[in-house]
Amino acid sequence: MNTIIPNDNNNKQLNFAITRFFKDNKIGYILKQCNFSKGKGFSCIKVFQYIFMLVFTLQ
């Protein structure tokens, strides 16, 4: 399966840094307090994290 963002070393490092940022700053907890929710599918935090990553990969 093809992915939108290529799996090279730079993107792996960026993904790790963003994941660490989200955990360290409790972004999931903040989103939950703001009633950020959706019906089904991927978790809200993963969707938000993906959008956040797209900003830094300039796509």
Image (cartoon, helix red, strand yellow):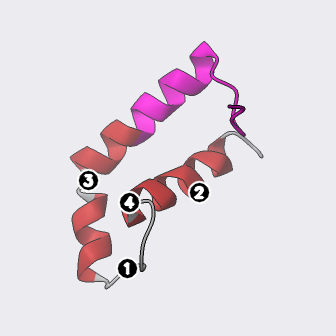
Check residue 21 for magenta coloring. Answer: no
Residue 50 coordinates in the image, percent (x, y): 54, 51
> How many angstroms separate mark 1 from mark 3 (CA)?
16 Å
Q: Earlier in the sequence, mark 2 or mark 3?
A: 3
Q: Amino acid at mark 3?
A: Asn
Q: Which residue is mark 2?
A: 51
Q: Position of residue 6 (x, y in %)?
A: 70, 27
User: Which amino acid is tagged 4?
Assistant: Ile
Residue 17, position as x, y percentages in the image? 42, 33
The residue carrying mark 1 is 36
Q: Earlier in the sequence, mark 4 or mark 1?
A: 1
Which callout, 1 or 3, points to the residue nearer the camera? Answer: 1
Badge 3 is on which residue? 25
Of discs 4 and 3, which sits in the foreground? 4
Q: Which residues are magenta?
A: 1-18
Q: Nearer the viewer, residue 40 or 6?
A: 40
**Seen from this angle, which residue lies furthest bottom?**
35
State the quadrant of the N terminus. top right
Does the magenta run of residues contain 13? yes
Q: Earlier in the sequence, mark 2 or mark 4?
A: 4
Side of 8 relative to 52 (left or right): right
The quarter of the displayed image where residue 45 is located: bottom left
Gap in angstroms between the C-alphas marked 2 and 3: 17 Å
Are the residues at dot 1 and dot 2 in contact (C-beta closer than 8 Å)? no
The residue beneath circle 4 is 45
Quick check: 58 left or right of 8?
right
Whether residues under marks 4 and 1 lie with C-beta atoms below 8 angstroms apart, the answer is no
What's the amino acid at mark 1?
Phe
Does dot 2 land on a helix, a strand or a loop?
helix
